[in-house]
Amino acid sequence: MARRRVTEPQLKNWEQVDECLKLMSDAENQISVIEAEMNAAIAEAKKEAAEKAAEYRELIKQNEGKIKEFTTINKDELKGKSRQLTFGTVGFRQSTKLLLPQDTAEVILKLRENGMVDCITVKETINKDTVKSYPEEEILKIGGYLQRTDSFWYETDKDSLAEAVQ
């Protein structure tokens, strides 16, 4: 014998729907409290960790400065650009930083004038909100269409729950 699916709704009236909304609102409030406690605990743990690590960060910063100063003075003793020691390696590496004027539009104009268009990035995307504002006939011309559905939504009233609890 095949199973039959029950098609009768679980809620029988609007009062039951309202009671479900009340339960959901209370659950959302409890989740907010739990998440607030969690975030406070995380913030406190981060603060404690930062305080514990502060002296070590300062030690690293001071020793880094001393090593940089010594290595700079004795740069000619390096084998190439670095020197391997027992507890690590020190040295210098070539780095190049590009500095451009603040006026981006002017730089782009000069890039175009000098035939350097490969240096310009153009990103094209579809603005769906703008496309939706066109008449449906126009949207059909580009191969799109508007799909309309009734989407269920709900909103709990946390204020009325707070009043009911008091």
Image: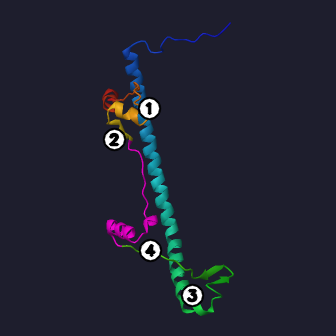
- Which residue, given by chain and number where applicable, does mark 2 sit on? 130
Eye-nearest disc, 4 or 3: 4
Quadrant where the image shows the N terminus: top right
Q: What residue type is disc 4 on? A: Leu
Q: What are the residue bounds of the magenta stretch?
A: 101-127
Sequence-wise, which precedes: disc 3 or disc 2? 3
Q: CB of mark 2 within 8 Å of CB of mark 4?
A: no
Mark number displayed over residue 67: none
Q: Is residue 57 above or below residue 67?
A: above
Does the segment drawn in magenta span residue 10? no
Q: Residues within 10 Å of mark 2 (few under 14, many from 20)?
A: few
The residue type indicated by label 3 comes to Thr
Tell me which label, 1 or 4, sits earlier in the chain.
1
Q: Is residue 125 magenta?
A: yes
Q: Which numbered dot is residue 98?
A: 4
Classify residue 5 by image quadrant. Answer: top right
In the rendered image, the quadrant that contains the C terminus is top left
Q: Earlier in the sequence, mark 1 or mark 3?
A: 1
Residue at which label 3 appears: 71
Q: Position of residue 29 (x, y in %)?
A: 40, 35
Q: Would you place residue 79 above or below residue 154 in this image?
A: below
